[in-house]
Amino acid sequence: MRKPIIAGNWKMNKNRKDAEQLITELVPLVKDAKCDVVICVPFTDLDTAVKATKNTNIKVGAQNVHWAESGAFTGEISADMLKEIGVEYVIIGHSERRQYFGETDESVNKRTLKALEAGLKPIICVGETLAEREKGKTDEVVTRQTKAAFKDIPKEELKNIVIAYEPVWAIGTGKTATADDANSTIKVIRDTMAELYCKNCAEETVRIQYGGSMNPKNASELMAMPEIDGGLIGGASLKAEDFSKVVNY
Ligand code: 13P
């Protein structure tokens, strides 16, 4: 019903030569994947990645996009620029951008609207910090982030959007949310989508990934949970063999 989707987020890693090498190794390892496979690479690797994945089942994503068409926005990249070079997905609102680069619920929504208009597929990240979790605010935070991200987004676009639930305290720390915890928070997000759109859309169309120290060892347990439709993988996406094991969970 909902096709699983495993995406690698390389973050700020790998020059062009490394990128080409990793992709060359990865292509044969994931060619029979049952899920959608995406690699989200730094801007400077996008062109290399698009070329190296041509005629394969691997799709390419960027890690951010601006909401304006063009103009005086030094250091930013537009949705049309990404689309033009063959990029298909884009991560929006990653917690590292919220934490270090002033990303807000509102800017996440603006970027998402623009990405969709250009025909890109957003991977929208939500997730609570450790402090929020300890105060028992997890459900409240992911509900608020989800509602804000989807403001003015029509139902017809849901098939083009992926949500990634990434508890901030689990990112790069080796601490994974338990499969049950991840599943129940993703259920909260799905219920929010049902409230915003409709129960069927939330259950049949909306794909929600888990992200945060997901790796070859824990992927199958996480992927076995009924609400978890995939993963957004950081560290373990930087080696072809590890990433392929997650993809072939
Ligand atoms: P890690 O898999 O390194 O914890 O990173 C997760 C993440 O932030 C993916 O976007």
Image (tube, grey):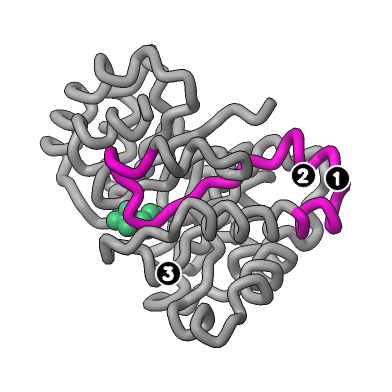
Report which residue position mark 1 lands on: 199
Above or below 130: residue 173: above
Query: Would you say the residues marked 2 and 1 are in contact, meaning their CB atoms lie under 8 Å apart?
Result: yes
- Ligand 1 neighbours mark 1 (CB distance < 8 Å): no
Disc on res. 168: 3
Mark 1, other Cα within 10 Å: few <14 / some 14–19 / many ≥20: some
Report which residue position mark 2 lands on: 202
Q: Which residue occupies 22% across, 36% down?
A: 242
Q: Tell me the CA gap for discs 3 and 1.
A: 28 Å
220 or 56: nearer the viewer: 220
Above or below 95: residue 222: above
Q: Tell me the CA gap for discs 3 and 2.
A: 24 Å
Q: To which quarter of the image does residue 159 belong?
A: top right
Question: Label 2 amino acid?
Answer: Ala
Question: Label 3 amino acid?
Answer: Val
SS of the residue under disc 2: helix
Disc on res. 183: none
Residue 29: image location, x then y, percent? 26, 19
Mark 3, other Cα within 10 Å: few <14 / some 14–19 / many ≥20: many
SS of the residue under disc 3: helix
SS of the residue under disc 1: helix
Above or below 80: residue 178: below
61 or 125: nearer the viewer: 125
Q: Quadrant of ligand 1?
A: bottom left
The C terminus appears in which quarter of the rendering? top left
| 75 relative to 155 in the view: left or right | left
Residue 36: image location, x then y, percent? 49, 27
Q: In the rendered structure, which segment of residues is drawn in magenta?
A: 191-219
Decide which of tag 3 and tag 2 comes sooner along the chain.
Answer: 3
